[in-house]
Amino acid sequence: MGQRMTRRQVDEGLELYAGKNYDAAIKKWTISLQKMKDNRLRFSTLGYLAAASRDRGRNKDYLVYAVQQIDIAHEIDDNNLRAQAYLTLSRANEMLADYFKAVSYSRSAVQYSSPGESVQGYALLVMADSYIGLCNFSKVLECLDKALIISHEKEDRLMEIHVMSTMGKVYLALKDFTKALAFQRRAHELSLSYANSTVDQNADLSSKFVRLTKLKLATPMRLMGDYESATRSVEEAMRAATSVGDRPVQAKCLVCIGDIQRSQNNNEVACKKYEAAIPMLQDMNDRYSYTLAMIGLVKASLTLNTPKQTVTDILATALSTALAMGNKLMQARCHLLNESIYLSDNRMEEARQAHETAERLFQEADLVCSVCQKPMGMQSDHIQILTCTHIFHQRCITDLLQKWARQAQSCPKCHRNVLYSRSYIALVCI
Ligand SMILES: [Zn+2]
Ligand SMILES: [Zn+2]
Protein backbone atom coordinates (compact mmCIF):
# COMPACT_ATOMS: atom_id res chain seq x y z
CA MET A 1 0.00 0.00 0.00
CA GLY A 2 1.37 3.41 -0.91
CA GLN A 3 2.16 5.90 1.82
CA ARG A 4 -0.33 8.39 0.42
CA MET A 5 -3.09 5.83 0.68
CA THR A 6 -2.11 4.93 4.24
CA ARG A 7 -2.16 8.61 5.14
CA ARG A 8 -5.64 8.86 3.65
CA GLN A 9 -6.82 5.90 5.73
CA VAL A 10 -5.55 7.58 8.89
CA ASP A 11 -7.43 10.76 7.99
CA GLU A 12 -10.58 8.77 7.25
CA GLY A 13 -10.22 7.27 10.71
CA LEU A 14 -10.08 10.76 12.18
CA GLU A 15 -13.25 11.73 10.31
CA LEU A 16 -15.04 8.62 11.52
CA TYR A 17 -13.93 9.39 15.06
CA ALA A 18 -15.16 12.97 14.83
CA GLY A 19 -18.50 11.56 13.65
CA LYS A 20 -18.56 9.37 16.77
CA ASN A 21 -18.09 6.15 14.77
CA TYR A 22 -15.51 5.02 17.29
CA ASP A 23 -15.27 1.34 16.45
CA ALA A 24 -15.06 2.02 12.72
CA ALA A 25 -12.28 4.56 13.34
CA ILE A 26 -10.33 2.10 15.48
CA LYS A 27 -10.69 -0.55 12.76
CA LYS A 28 -9.51 1.85 10.07
CA TRP A 29 -6.41 2.85 12.06
CA THR A 30 -5.58 -0.74 12.95
CA ILE A 31 -5.69 -1.78 9.27
CA SER A 32 -3.64 1.23 8.17
CA LEU A 33 -0.93 0.38 10.72
CA GLN A 34 -0.29 -3.02 9.19
CA LYS A 35 1.51 -1.66 6.14
CA MET A 36 2.61 1.69 7.47
CA LYS A 37 6.34 2.32 7.02
CA ASP A 38 6.72 5.95 8.10
CA ASN A 39 7.62 5.77 11.79
CA ARG A 40 6.29 9.24 12.64
CA LEU A 41 2.94 8.45 11.06
CA ARG A 42 2.93 5.15 12.96
CA PHE A 43 3.60 7.08 16.16
CA SER A 44 0.71 9.49 15.68
CA THR A 45 -1.67 6.73 14.55
CA LEU A 46 -0.82 4.75 17.70
CA GLY A 47 -1.55 7.96 19.63
CA TYR A 48 -5.04 8.18 18.04
CA LEU A 49 -5.65 4.52 18.85
CA ALA A 50 -4.49 5.03 22.43
CA ALA A 51 -6.79 8.03 22.96
CA ALA A 52 -9.74 6.20 21.38
CA SER A 53 -9.16 3.13 23.58
CA ARG A 54 -8.98 5.32 26.65
CA ASP A 55 -12.26 7.04 25.81
CA ARG A 56 -13.93 3.66 25.37
CA GLY A 57 -12.55 2.35 28.68
CA ARG A 58 -10.25 -0.18 27.00
CA ASN A 59 -7.41 0.55 29.38
CA LYS A 60 -5.33 -2.53 28.57
CA ASP A 61 -5.34 -1.64 24.84
CA TYR A 62 -4.34 1.89 25.80
CA LEU A 63 -1.31 0.45 27.56
CA VAL A 64 -0.37 -1.73 24.58
CA TYR A 65 -0.41 1.24 22.16
CA ALA A 66 1.69 3.29 24.57
CA VAL A 67 4.33 0.55 24.70
CA GLN A 68 4.47 0.46 20.90
CA GLN A 69 4.95 4.24 20.85
CA ILE A 70 7.92 3.91 23.22
CA ASP A 71 9.59 1.46 20.81
CA ILE A 72 9.21 3.88 17.90
CA ALA A 73 10.49 6.84 19.94
CA HIS A 74 13.62 4.87 20.86
CA GLU A 75 14.08 3.68 17.29
CA ILE A 76 14.09 7.18 15.82
CA ASP A 77 15.82 8.53 18.91
CA ASP A 78 13.55 11.55 19.39
CA ASN A 79 13.22 12.97 22.90
CA ASN A 80 9.96 14.82 22.22
CA LEU A 81 8.33 11.60 21.08
CA ARG A 82 9.89 9.77 24.05
CA ALA A 83 8.34 12.30 26.43
CA GLN A 84 4.92 11.96 24.79
CA ALA A 85 5.08 8.17 24.77
CA TYR A 86 6.15 7.98 28.42
CA LEU A 87 3.30 10.34 29.30
CA THR A 88 0.78 8.01 27.62
CA LEU A 89 2.39 4.99 29.26
CA SER A 90 2.25 6.62 32.69
CA ARG A 91 -1.43 7.58 32.26
CA ALA A 92 -2.23 4.03 31.16
CA ASN A 93 -0.61 2.64 34.31
CA GLU A 94 -2.36 5.20 36.50
CA MET A 95 -5.72 4.22 35.02
CA LEU A 96 -4.93 0.57 35.71
CA ALA A 97 -4.05 1.64 39.28
CA ASP A 98 -0.45 0.50 38.82
CA TYR A 99 0.76 3.57 40.68
CA PHE A 100 4.46 2.85 41.20
CA LYS A 101 4.94 2.23 37.49
CA ALA A 102 2.87 5.32 36.67
CA VAL A 103 5.12 7.49 38.86
CA SER A 104 8.27 6.08 37.34
CA TYR A 105 7.07 6.56 33.73
CA SER A 106 5.82 10.09 34.41
CA ARG A 107 9.32 10.86 35.74
CA SER A 108 10.73 9.67 32.42
CA ALA A 109 8.26 11.93 30.59
CA VAL A 110 9.46 14.91 32.65
CA GLN A 111 13.08 13.94 32.06
CA TYR A 112 12.75 13.77 28.27
CA SER A 113 10.77 17.00 27.88
CA SER A 114 12.09 20.55 28.06
CA PRO A 115 11.48 22.48 31.28
CA GLY A 116 8.09 24.19 31.45
CA GLU A 117 6.67 22.24 28.48
CA SER A 118 3.02 21.19 28.58
CA VAL A 119 4.07 17.53 28.59
CA GLN A 120 5.78 18.19 31.94
CA GLY A 121 2.59 19.65 33.39
CA TYR A 122 0.53 16.65 32.28
CA ALA A 123 3.18 14.22 33.53
CA LEU A 124 3.09 15.98 36.91
CA LEU A 125 -0.68 15.53 36.93
CA VAL A 126 -0.34 11.79 36.33
CA MET A 127 2.18 11.74 39.17
CA ALA A 128 -0.24 13.65 41.43
CA ASP A 129 -3.11 11.26 40.62
CA SER A 130 -0.85 8.27 41.25
CA TYR A 131 0.32 9.65 44.60
CA ILE A 132 -3.36 10.06 45.57
CA GLY A 133 -3.71 6.36 44.80
CA LEU A 134 -0.72 5.71 47.07
CA CYS A 135 -2.04 8.18 49.71
CA ASN A 136 1.17 10.23 49.68
CA PHE A 137 -0.47 13.64 49.95
CA SER A 138 2.64 15.77 50.39
CA LYS A 139 3.91 14.46 47.05
CA VAL A 140 0.50 15.11 45.49
CA LEU A 141 0.70 18.75 46.56
CA GLU A 142 4.27 19.16 45.31
CA CYS A 143 3.25 17.89 41.86
CA LEU A 144 0.07 19.98 41.72
CA ASP A 145 2.04 23.03 42.69
CA LYS A 146 4.40 22.69 39.74
CA ALA A 147 1.59 21.73 37.34
CA LEU A 148 -0.45 24.78 38.33
CA ILE A 149 2.49 27.06 37.57
CA ILE A 150 2.98 25.44 34.13
CA SER A 151 -0.77 25.67 33.40
CA HIS A 152 -0.65 29.41 34.03
CA GLU A 153 2.55 29.94 32.04
CA LYS A 154 1.19 28.01 29.08
CA GLU A 155 -2.35 29.36 29.58
CA ASP A 156 -3.49 25.75 29.40
CA ARG A 157 -7.02 25.76 30.74
CA LEU A 158 -7.49 21.99 30.60
CA MET A 159 -4.39 21.53 32.73
CA GLU A 160 -5.70 24.03 35.26
CA ILE A 161 -9.09 22.28 35.38
CA HIS A 162 -7.29 19.02 36.05
CA VAL A 163 -5.24 20.60 38.87
CA MET A 164 -8.38 21.99 40.55
CA SER A 165 -10.18 18.69 40.23
CA THR A 166 -7.26 16.70 41.68
CA MET A 167 -7.05 19.17 44.55
CA GLY A 168 -10.76 18.46 45.17
CA LYS A 169 -9.89 14.75 45.23
CA VAL A 170 -7.22 15.44 47.90
CA TYR A 171 -9.74 17.16 50.17
CA LEU A 172 -12.29 14.43 49.50
CA ALA A 173 -9.79 11.78 50.63
CA LEU A 174 -9.08 13.91 53.73
CA LYS A 175 -12.85 14.21 54.30
CA ASP A 176 -12.96 18.00 54.16
CA PHE A 177 -16.08 18.10 52.01
CA THR A 178 -16.49 21.88 52.01
CA LYS A 179 -13.10 22.42 50.40
CA ALA A 180 -13.53 19.38 48.14
CA LEU A 181 -16.75 20.91 46.81
CA ALA A 182 -15.17 24.35 46.40
CA PHE A 183 -12.36 22.93 44.24
CA GLN A 184 -14.73 20.78 42.17
CA ARG A 185 -16.96 23.82 41.63
CA ARG A 186 -13.96 25.78 40.41
CA ALA A 187 -13.00 22.91 38.06
CA HIS A 188 -16.55 22.76 36.71
CA GLU A 189 -16.81 26.52 36.18
CA LEU A 190 -13.50 26.53 34.35
CA SER A 191 -14.59 23.66 32.13
CA LEU A 192 -17.88 25.45 31.30
CA SER A 193 -16.08 28.63 30.35
CA TYR A 194 -13.58 26.59 28.32
CA ALA A 195 -16.46 24.86 26.51
CA ASN A 196 -18.04 28.22 25.71
CA SER A 197 -14.83 29.63 24.32
CA THR A 198 -13.60 26.69 22.23
CA VAL A 199 -14.07 26.16 18.56
CA ASP A 200 -15.62 23.05 17.05
CA GLN A 201 -12.45 21.00 16.83
CA ASN A 202 -12.12 20.93 20.62
CA ALA A 203 -15.82 20.48 21.28
CA ASP A 204 -15.46 16.77 22.10
CA LEU A 205 -12.67 17.40 24.57
CA SER A 206 -14.41 20.29 26.28
CA SER A 207 -17.71 18.42 26.62
CA LYS A 208 -15.75 15.50 28.09
CA PHE A 209 -14.39 17.81 30.79
CA VAL A 210 -17.84 19.28 31.42
CA ARG A 211 -19.41 15.88 32.12
CA LEU A 212 -16.42 14.68 34.13
CA THR A 213 -16.38 17.72 36.40
CA LYS A 214 -20.17 17.55 36.73
CA LEU A 215 -19.82 13.97 37.98
CA LYS A 216 -17.11 14.99 40.43
CA LEU A 217 -19.35 17.67 41.96
CA ALA A 218 -21.87 15.05 43.03
CA THR A 219 -19.78 13.24 45.67
CA PRO A 220 -18.97 16.20 47.96
CA MET A 221 -22.56 17.43 47.47
CA ARG A 222 -23.85 14.05 48.67
CA LEU A 223 -21.47 13.95 51.61
CA MET A 224 -22.69 17.38 52.69
CA GLY A 225 -26.28 16.08 52.58
CA ASP A 226 -27.43 17.92 49.45
CA TYR A 227 -28.90 14.87 47.73
CA GLU A 228 -31.03 16.88 45.33
CA SER A 229 -28.11 18.78 43.78
CA ALA A 230 -25.94 15.64 43.83
CA THR A 231 -28.62 13.68 41.96
CA ARG A 232 -29.14 16.45 39.41
CA SER A 233 -25.43 16.75 38.78
CA VAL A 234 -24.76 13.03 38.36
CA GLU A 235 -27.85 12.51 36.20
CA GLU A 236 -26.73 15.28 33.85
CA ALA A 237 -23.28 13.71 33.66
CA MET A 238 -24.85 10.30 33.00
CA ARG A 239 -27.05 11.64 30.19
CA ALA A 240 -24.09 13.35 28.54
CA ALA A 241 -21.92 10.24 28.89
CA THR A 242 -24.64 7.95 27.51
CA SER A 243 -25.20 10.16 24.46
CA VAL A 244 -21.56 9.75 23.37
CA GLY A 245 -20.98 6.21 24.70
CA ASP A 246 -18.46 7.32 27.34
CA ARG A 247 -18.34 4.04 29.29
CA PRO A 248 -15.79 5.10 31.93
CA VAL A 249 -17.97 8.03 33.02
CA GLN A 250 -21.16 5.94 32.76
CA ALA A 251 -19.74 3.33 35.14
CA LYS A 252 -18.54 5.96 37.61
CA CYS A 253 -21.95 7.67 37.47
CA LEU A 254 -23.62 4.36 38.38
CA VAL A 255 -21.39 4.07 41.47
CA CYS A 256 -22.16 7.66 42.39
CA ILE A 257 -25.94 7.15 41.98
CA GLY A 258 -25.59 4.04 44.14
CA ASP A 259 -23.86 6.13 46.82
CA ILE A 260 -26.59 8.79 46.73
CA GLN A 261 -29.33 6.16 47.02
CA ARG A 262 -27.47 4.49 49.88
CA SER A 263 -27.10 7.79 51.72
CA GLN A 264 -30.89 8.15 51.51
CA ASN A 265 -31.40 4.61 52.82
CA ASN A 266 -32.61 3.25 49.48
CA ASN A 267 -30.24 0.37 49.87
CA GLU A 268 -31.88 -2.07 47.48
CA VAL A 269 -31.72 0.44 44.63
CA ALA A 270 -28.13 1.25 45.64
CA CYS A 271 -27.10 -2.43 45.43
CA LYS A 272 -28.56 -2.70 41.92
CA LYS A 273 -26.54 0.33 40.79
CA TYR A 274 -23.30 -1.05 42.24
CA GLU A 275 -23.99 -4.45 40.73
CA ALA A 276 -24.46 -2.83 37.32
CA ALA A 277 -21.23 -0.83 37.64
CA ILE A 278 -18.95 -3.58 38.98
CA PRO A 279 -18.71 -5.74 35.82
CA MET A 280 -18.15 -2.61 33.69
CA LEU A 281 -15.32 -1.45 35.95
CA GLN A 282 -13.83 -4.95 35.99
CA ASP A 283 -13.93 -5.04 32.23
CA MET A 284 -12.10 -1.68 32.09
CA ASN A 285 -9.57 -2.80 34.72
CA ASP A 286 -10.39 0.35 36.70
CA ARG A 287 -9.39 -1.08 40.08
CA TYR A 288 -9.77 2.22 41.94
CA SER A 289 -13.46 2.77 41.08
CA TYR A 290 -14.08 -0.97 41.34
CA THR A 291 -12.91 -0.96 44.96
CA LEU A 292 -15.09 2.08 45.72
CA ALA A 293 -18.10 0.25 44.22
CA MET A 294 -17.36 -2.88 46.27
CA ILE A 295 -17.10 -0.82 49.48
CA GLY A 296 -20.43 0.86 48.62
CA LEU A 297 -22.00 -2.56 47.99
CA VAL A 298 -20.80 -3.78 51.40
CA LYS A 299 -22.26 -0.74 53.17
CA ALA A 300 -25.62 -1.09 51.40
CA SER A 301 -25.76 -4.88 51.87
CA LEU A 302 -25.11 -4.57 55.61
CA THR A 303 -28.48 -2.85 56.06
CA LEU A 304 -30.34 -5.50 54.04
CA ASN A 305 -30.90 -9.16 54.80
CA THR A 306 -27.83 -10.19 52.83
CA PRO A 307 -26.11 -13.23 54.41
CA LYS A 308 -23.14 -12.05 56.45
CA GLN A 309 -20.78 -14.42 54.71
CA THR A 310 -21.62 -12.84 51.33
CA VAL A 311 -20.91 -9.37 52.70
CA THR A 312 -17.64 -10.49 54.30
CA ASP A 313 -16.56 -12.06 51.00
CA ILE A 314 -17.23 -8.84 49.06
CA LEU A 315 -15.30 -6.88 51.68
CA ALA A 316 -12.37 -9.32 51.47
CA THR A 317 -12.22 -8.78 47.70
CA ALA A 318 -12.28 -4.99 48.16
CA LEU A 319 -9.51 -5.22 50.75
CA SER A 320 -7.30 -7.38 48.57
CA THR A 321 -7.71 -4.98 45.62
CA ALA A 322 -6.87 -2.02 47.87
CA LEU A 323 -3.79 -3.93 49.07
CA ALA A 324 -2.73 -4.73 45.52
CA MET A 325 -3.02 -1.04 44.58
CA GLY A 326 -1.09 0.00 47.69
CA ASN A 327 -3.93 2.33 48.73
CA LYS A 328 -3.73 2.62 52.52
CA LEU A 329 -6.85 4.77 52.96
CA MET A 330 -9.07 2.29 51.15
CA GLN A 331 -7.51 -0.54 53.18
CA ALA A 332 -8.24 1.42 56.35
CA ARG A 333 -11.86 1.97 55.30
CA CYS A 334 -12.24 -1.80 54.71
CA HIS A 335 -10.86 -2.52 58.20
CA LEU A 336 -13.29 0.01 59.71
CA LEU A 337 -16.16 -1.77 57.96
CA ASN A 338 -14.85 -5.06 59.33
CA GLU A 339 -14.86 -3.46 62.77
CA SER A 340 -18.55 -2.60 62.49
CA ILE A 341 -19.36 -6.14 61.32
CA TYR A 342 -17.48 -7.61 64.33
CA LEU A 343 -19.20 -5.18 66.69
CA SER A 344 -22.64 -6.21 65.45
CA ASP A 345 -21.64 -9.82 66.18
CA ASN A 346 -20.32 -8.92 69.62
CA ARG A 347 -16.82 -10.05 68.63
CA MET A 348 -15.15 -7.31 70.63
CA GLU A 349 -11.53 -8.45 70.43
CA GLU A 350 -11.61 -8.78 66.64
CA ALA A 351 -13.34 -5.40 66.39
CA ARG A 352 -10.59 -3.78 68.46
CA GLN A 353 -7.91 -5.33 66.26
CA ALA A 354 -9.62 -4.12 63.09
CA HIS A 355 -9.80 -0.60 64.51
CA GLU A 356 -6.12 -0.67 65.47
CA THR A 357 -5.13 -1.84 62.00
CA ALA A 358 -7.10 1.04 60.47
CA GLU A 359 -5.42 3.57 62.77
CA ARG A 360 -1.99 2.17 61.94
CA LEU A 361 -2.75 2.57 58.22
CA PHE A 362 -3.69 6.24 58.75
CA GLN A 363 -0.35 6.70 60.53
CA GLU A 364 1.53 4.95 57.73
CA ALA A 365 -0.14 7.29 55.21
CA ASP A 366 1.21 10.14 57.34
CA LEU A 367 -2.36 11.21 58.08
CA VAL A 368 -1.95 11.96 61.75
CA CYS A 369 -2.20 15.60 62.76
CA SER A 370 1.07 16.34 64.53
CA VAL A 371 -0.64 18.91 66.78
CA CYS A 372 -3.32 16.69 68.37
CA GLN A 373 -1.87 13.29 67.31
CA LYS A 374 -5.29 12.18 65.99
CA PRO A 375 -5.85 10.72 62.50
CA MET A 376 -7.07 12.90 59.65
CA GLY A 377 -9.45 11.55 57.02
CA MET A 378 -11.22 9.14 59.37
CA GLN A 379 -14.16 11.44 60.00
CA SER A 380 -15.49 14.53 58.27
CA ASP A 381 -13.40 17.51 59.40
CA HIS A 382 -11.89 20.82 58.33
CA ILE A 383 -8.34 20.45 57.07
CA GLN A 384 -5.64 23.02 56.48
CA ILE A 385 -2.65 22.57 54.19
CA LEU A 386 0.37 24.73 54.91
CA THR A 387 2.69 26.16 52.28
CA CYS A 388 5.30 23.49 53.14
CA THR A 389 2.58 20.97 52.03
CA HIS A 390 2.09 19.58 55.55
CA ILE A 391 -1.47 18.85 56.56
CA PHE A 392 -3.28 19.56 59.85
CA HIS A 393 -6.75 19.83 61.33
CA GLN A 394 -7.88 23.38 60.77
CA ARG A 395 -8.76 23.98 64.41
CA CYS A 396 -5.36 22.68 65.59
CA ILE A 397 -3.38 24.91 63.27
CA THR A 398 -5.63 27.93 63.89
CA ASP A 399 -4.67 27.74 67.58
CA LEU A 400 -1.03 27.74 66.55
CA LEU A 401 -1.59 30.59 64.11
CA GLN A 402 -2.73 32.74 66.98
CA LYS A 403 0.48 31.98 68.88
CA TRP A 404 2.43 32.75 65.71
CA ALA A 405 1.73 36.41 66.24
CA ARG A 406 4.40 36.24 68.90
CA GLN A 407 6.61 33.39 67.69
CA ALA A 408 8.38 32.35 64.52
CA GLN A 409 5.81 31.24 61.99
CA SER A 410 7.11 27.75 61.43
CA CYS A 411 5.36 24.51 60.59
CA PRO A 412 5.13 22.27 63.70
CA LYS A 413 6.19 19.33 61.59
CA CYS A 414 9.11 20.44 59.41
CA HIS A 415 9.89 23.75 61.18
CA ARG A 416 10.16 25.52 57.87
CA ASN A 417 8.99 29.07 57.90
CA VAL A 418 5.59 28.84 56.27
CA LEU A 419 5.79 32.39 54.97
CA TYR A 420 8.91 31.70 52.95
CA SER A 421 8.35 28.09 51.88
CA ARG A 422 5.60 29.06 49.51
CA SER A 423 3.52 26.40 47.93
CA TYR A 424 1.50 27.88 45.14
CA ILE A 425 -1.35 25.42 45.40
CA ALA A 426 -1.69 25.83 49.17
CA LEU A 427 -2.23 29.53 48.57
CA VAL A 428 -5.01 29.11 46.02
CA CYS A 429 -7.96 30.86 47.61
CA ILE A 430 -11.19 29.12 46.94
ZN1 LIG B 1 -5.25 18.00 64.98
ZN1 LIG C 1 5.82 21.59 57.22
Image (cartoon, rainbow, N blue to C red):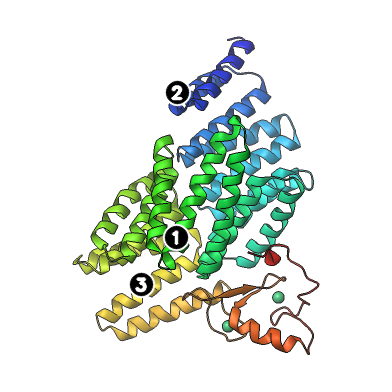
Amino acid bearing label 1: Thr
Can you tell which mark lies on residue 337? Answer: 3
The quarter of the picture where the C terminus appears is bottom right
Amino acid bearing label 3: Leu
Mark 3 and mark 2: span between their CA atoms?
45 Å
Mark 1, Cα crowd under 10 Å, few <14 / some 14-19 / many 20+, is many
Disc 1 under 8 Å from ligand 1? The reply is: no
Mark 2, Cα crowd under 10 Å, few <14 / some 14-19 / many 20+, is some
Q: Quadrant of residue 407?
A: bottom right
Specify whether residue 287 is in view: yes
Q: Which residue is nearer to you in this view: 247 or 58?
A: 247
Residue 117, position as x, y percentages in the image: 75, 44
Residue 121, position as x, y percentages in the image: 69, 49
Q: Which residue is nearer to you in this view: 368 or 203?
A: 203
Image side of residue 309 versus residue 112, left or right? left
Amino acid bearing label 2: Ala
Mark 1 and mark 2: span between their CA atoms?
35 Å
The quarter of the picture where the N terminus appears is top right
Q: Which residue is nearer to you in this view: 259 or 229?
A: 229
Q: Quadrant of residue 12?
A: top right
Mark 3, Cα crowd under 10 Å, few <14 / some 14-19 / many 20+, is many
Disc 3 under 8 Å from ligand 1? The reply is: no
Q: Residue at x 73, y 45 (%)?
A: 155
Of the image marks 1 and 3, the number of the one nearer the N terminus = 1
Residue topped by disc 1? 219
Q: Residue at x 68, y 58 (%)?
A: 143
Residue topped by disc 2? 24
Q: Residue at x 41, y 58 (%)?
A: 230
- Compared with 103, 394 (above or below) is below
Residue 23, position as x, y percentages in the image: 44, 27
Can you tell which mark lies on residue 233? Answer: none
